[in-house]
Amino acid sequence: MNQKKILFQQKLFYSTAGCLIFLAIWVILGYILLKYPDYSQFYGFHPLATIKAFYHLLYSPHFWDAVIASLRRVFFGLSFAFIVGVPVGLLIGYYDSIWMMTNIPIQFLRMISPLSWMPIAILILPSFEKAIYFLITMACIWPIILSTAQGVNRMNPQILAMAKNQGANDIQLVFKVVLPTAVPSIIVGLRMALGISWIILVPAEFLGISSGLGYSINDARDTLEYDRLLALVIAIGFIGLFLDTSVRLLEKQSDLRYIMRIG
Amino acid sequence: MNKYTRRDFIRTTSKMIGVAGAGSAFYIPELLSAEQQTLRIGYLPIIDSAPLLIAYANGYFQDEGLKLARPRMIRSWSTLSESFMANKFNLVHLLFPIPLWMRYQNRIPVKILAWDHTNGSAITVRADSEIHGFSDLGGKQIAVPYWYSMHNTIIQMGLRKAGLTPVIQPQNKRLEKNQVNLFVLSPPQMAPALLGKKIDGYIVAEPFNALAELKIKARIMRFVGDIWKNHPCCVVVMKEALVKKSPVFTAKVVHAVARAQLWINHNREKTAKILSREETRLLPQSYRILHHALNEYSTDMYGIDSPIHAIRHPEWKLNRVDFQPYPYPSATHVILNEMKKTLVEGNSQFLNQLDPTFIEKDLIEKRFVKEAINNLGGMSKFPHMDLTSPWEREEIIDFAI
């Protein structure tokens, strides 16, 4: 018990120190910026102005509408990527022939910046909202496919042989052996995909929608309101942190179950 | 000997569902009849969009019996053009050269139905810079909003008039004293770039000049309207197929837009208020900035005796932005001829084969706008019309360098 307490205290200490150092650097940079009267317009980037703007943001209903709209887009985009990506990843990881067939096309497609898909998205999707889902899916599907495939690959072939020996049919193999083994890798892929989706949300919301965090950031740029811009950036950072932490809790859960199953 | 198994059945049905699903994504709204046609408007968050937005906000489209949803804001000309070409919108405002490019280079049949506005652009520089006229632009970096824009054409006209050579080259390449380097920046990036000394000036539509004046203490070098009297900038565009198939729909649309332009001319403060973020949020800017962008054109501030000296033709009695719909043929001639001399990125060879008189009839559809103007009381209702010959005018271009 004592060891756990010490570990926790260490973690608290180091993470607090890290945040404080980060804040200090920001304040120093802000101070340096202020020294130049020419850059007075960029005063908005100073921590004090930003905190004030952040406070106003929390009280504005538009902001919360924007959060919901953006979360919705990330949710749908990631879900499509997950629903399509995991089965494809499983197939690729399990069958060598499929891996050899899809390797080059996937490497090619994943290098295409999701924003280059914009004209195509506009053309084939019936609405801008769905076009944004498409862009997010196109960005997020690759890490999910690749990490799922890797998760399957990592599996010990002896376990597979053992299960087959004990009379497992195809369905049971997939759901009781292959999938649980791949889950830790899938979750790693999900975390990466989450990060990517959050990043391309802002440029993706360049399309014709009327609310969202990226939309609000574009508004702030269009009106040269940099304090609001930075406040939005901080809000986005917090939300992203929250989402990532939630997925990591999921990861811990699945890791525990995996360990219990093997041990 | 093929047994039609359950597997085959599932495969076939899922293929059918897939095709149907993909097909519905290519849903082409144009096939609806005129009565069911919904007006889908796309716009950029600049003052140029005011006629379309006010026609929506004041209910003019609805008065004509048209069905429409709230106009959609797009952030860049490329995305707006792509969405228009993909039929996400059936009514947009575009920079004058864009439909020209669409129709004659990309072979997409579009029609210009009316002018969206005149004037409303300016060249902005830093307050502390030594630039007071075109001849001071030698060796400088100037940003334009889009290659296929009136702004690019006019600034190059001015540079050549001052004996300078416009070039397009990387920013860090050496620039001679008689050369001026041009490149494209999106309007919201122009003010920060000016402030950060990445560019020495830019030419753009309002409200980005007003924004720079009010927020970073920039200075207007010249107003473009003060150079080319009542020049066109944006135009109202629809697809030719829609215009041909639904002339009644088109007439209603043009009528509503012209009515909005008339209203804006007489209700400028109200326009700024309605469109601002404090009311409909159709434009993200605040009332103060929109008001400045629409109305601030006083000789006290910009006239000959002022330090800014941006207005050199006070006798033209213009406004900072004016709204009138009639597409004067003489302006089309000037634009096309000047565009042939304008330096752009991309292949503009096709321009050399175009004849202004041909374009007049082929690209621009004047009957709807003429009918709309007559219904509203004639051209005398709009500013700066020569009553003796309302459908023609002489283009007056004077750089007053």
Image (cartoon, helix red, strand yellow):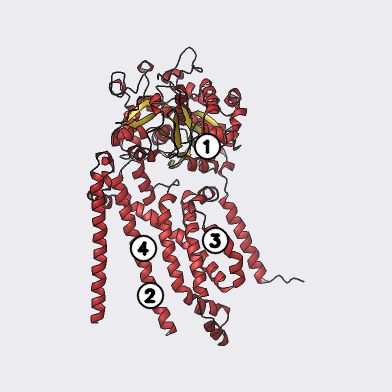
In this rendering, the answer to whether B313 lies above or below B177 is: above
| Kind of residue indicated by mark 3 | Gln
Q: Which residue is mark 1?
A: B345
SS label for mark 4 = helix
Quadrant where the C terminus of chain B sits is top left
The residue marked by circle 4 belongs to what chain? A
Residue A47, how many percent across, how many down? 24, 51
**Image mark for residue A214:** none
Quadrant where the N terminus of chain B sits is bottom right
Q: How many marks?
A: 4
Residue B370, how many percent across, how many down? 51, 23
Q: A101 left or right of B124?
A: right
Of the numbered discs 3 and 4, the one sitting upstream in the chain is: 3
In this rendering, the answer to whether B285 lies above or below A127 is: above
The residue marked by circle 1 belongs to what chain? B
Co-location on one chain, circles 1 and 3? no
| Kind of residue indicated by mark 4 | Leu
Q: Which residue is mark 2?
A: A253
Q: Which residue is mark 3?
A: A107
| Kind of residue indicated by mark 2 | Gln
Residue A260, how many percent across, how many down? 40, 82
CA distance separating discs 4 and 2: 16 Å
Q: Which residue is mark 4?
A: A243
The residue marked by circle 3 belongs to what chain? A
Of the numbered discs 4 and 2, the one sitting upstream in the chain is: 4
Q: B182 left or right of B105?
A: left
Foreground: B401 or B79?
A: B401
> In the image, what residue occupies the spot 48% across and 43% down?
B79
Q: Quadrant of residue A35?
A: top left
Q: Residue furthest bottom?
A: A166
Mark 3 vs mark 4, foreground winner is 3
SS label for mark 1 = loop
